[in-house]
Image: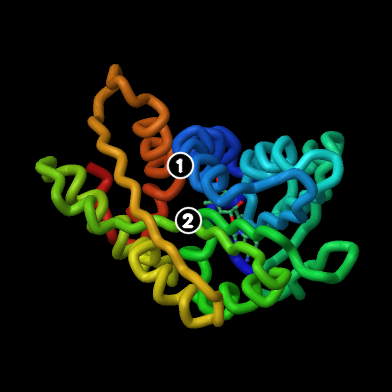
């Protein structure tokens, strides 16, 4: 089984993923709506986390469609089985990518915030593209730290420099977002589109954006001790 840095049994992880969903689902659902997701589609999500996108898509594809929600660890998605969603444990690096029952490939595959954790991301993109039916859609969303460096806060800058350096030392690529279009265009997809979204945030206890600040706070709580132990950040 592949290794992943933030295990689901960390007490903070379920809440952290819920904040990630609250943060990113509006962007993702907006794009999926524009792509015309429709009743009857077959859909696969990989590295689904808590499965919020699979749940949203299940509402769109209806009972005539098929939603397969997968992750390396299924503890946060097992409950979706009671909503008619197929839940599977799937390691996208090591396991064969699933096929829908009819074996024709999926109409839509979504991978959000998982490829940057995988040094094998190019191979994974290729295998996901191969699991589409002709005309099918592969939708990926990954982080890109480019706009972070314009911050005026020295503490924030120091934290992110350490965070990115620590991530790189673990083969995690927080710059992947900006090269996704190129990587997708190399696997024989007919048409590749790429969009970038930037959210502005302000720190502090009573900010108007608690989900964003909460997500980054909990990520720092989860990863910070390892960054300190590995010598990338001082406790202060
Ligand atoms: C940062 S979370 C993102 C969760 C969700 N996609 C989202 O955007 O809210 C990364 C997820 O990828 C999963 N993951 C990591 N490595 C994986 C692998 N090799 N195969 C499948 N899933 C993996 C983790 O278990 C975790 O749930």
Residues at marks 2 and 1 touching, judged by CB atoms closer than 8 Å? yes
Q: Which of the 4 quarters of the picture holds residue 143?
A: bottom left
Q: Residue 178: x and y, percent? A: 34, 65
**Residue located at (59% from left, 43% from top):** 10
Residue at horizontal 37%, vertical 70%? 179
Please identify the quarter of the rendering in which residue 188 is found: bottom right
Mark closer to the chain start, 2 or 1? 1
Image quarter for ligand 1 equals bottom right
Dot 1 falls on a residue whose secondary structure is helix
Snapshot quadrant of residue 96: bottom right
Residue under numbered circle 2: 141
Q: Is residue 16 visible?
A: no
Horizontal and vertical percent for residue 112?
54, 54
Left or right: 97, with 123 as reference point: right
Up-down: is 99 above or below 208?
Answer: below
Is the CB of mark 2 within 8 Å of ligand 1? yes
Determine crowd level at label 1: few under 14, some 14-19, many 20+ residues with C-alpha closer than 10 A.
few
Mark 2: few/some/many CA within 10 Å (<14, 14-19, 20+): many
Between 143 and 6, the one nearer to me in the picture: 143
Residue 129 at least partly seen: yes
Task: Quickly name the residue at label 1.
Answer: 27
Query: Quadrant location of the N terminus?
Result: bottom right
In this rendering, would 227 be left or right of 84? left
* Residue 32 in the image, given as x and y percentages of width and height: 56, 47
């Amino acid at each position: 089984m592949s290794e992943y840095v933030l295990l689901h049994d960390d007490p903070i992880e379920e809440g952290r993923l819920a904040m990630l969903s609250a943060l990113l689902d509006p962007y993702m659902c907006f794009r999926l709506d524009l792509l015309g997701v429709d009743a009857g589609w077959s859909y696969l999500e990989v590295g689904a986390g808590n499965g919020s996108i699979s749940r949203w898509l299940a509402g769109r594809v209806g009972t005539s469609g098929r939603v397969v929600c997968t992750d390396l660890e299924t503890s946060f998605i097992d409950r979706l089985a009671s909503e008619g969603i197929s839940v599977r444990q799937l390691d996208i690096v090591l396991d064969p990518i699933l096929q829908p029952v009819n074996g024709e490939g999926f109409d839509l595959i979504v991978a959000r915030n998982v490829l940057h954790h995988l040094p094998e991301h190019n191979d994974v993109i290729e295998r996901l593209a191969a699991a589409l039916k002709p005309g099918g859609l592969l939708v990926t969303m990954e982080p890109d730290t480019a706009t972070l460096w314009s911050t005026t806060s020295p503490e924030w800058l120091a934290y992110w420099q350490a965070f990115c350096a620590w991530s790189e030392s673990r083969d995690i690529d927080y710059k992947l977002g900006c090269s996704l279009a190129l990587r997708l265009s190399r696997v024989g997809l007919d048409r590749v589109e790429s969009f970038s979204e930037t959210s502005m945030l302000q720190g502090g206890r009573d900010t108007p954006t608690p989900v964003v600040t909460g997500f980054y706070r909990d990520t720092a709580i989860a990863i910070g001790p390892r960054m300190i132990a590995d010598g990338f950040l001082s406790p202060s």
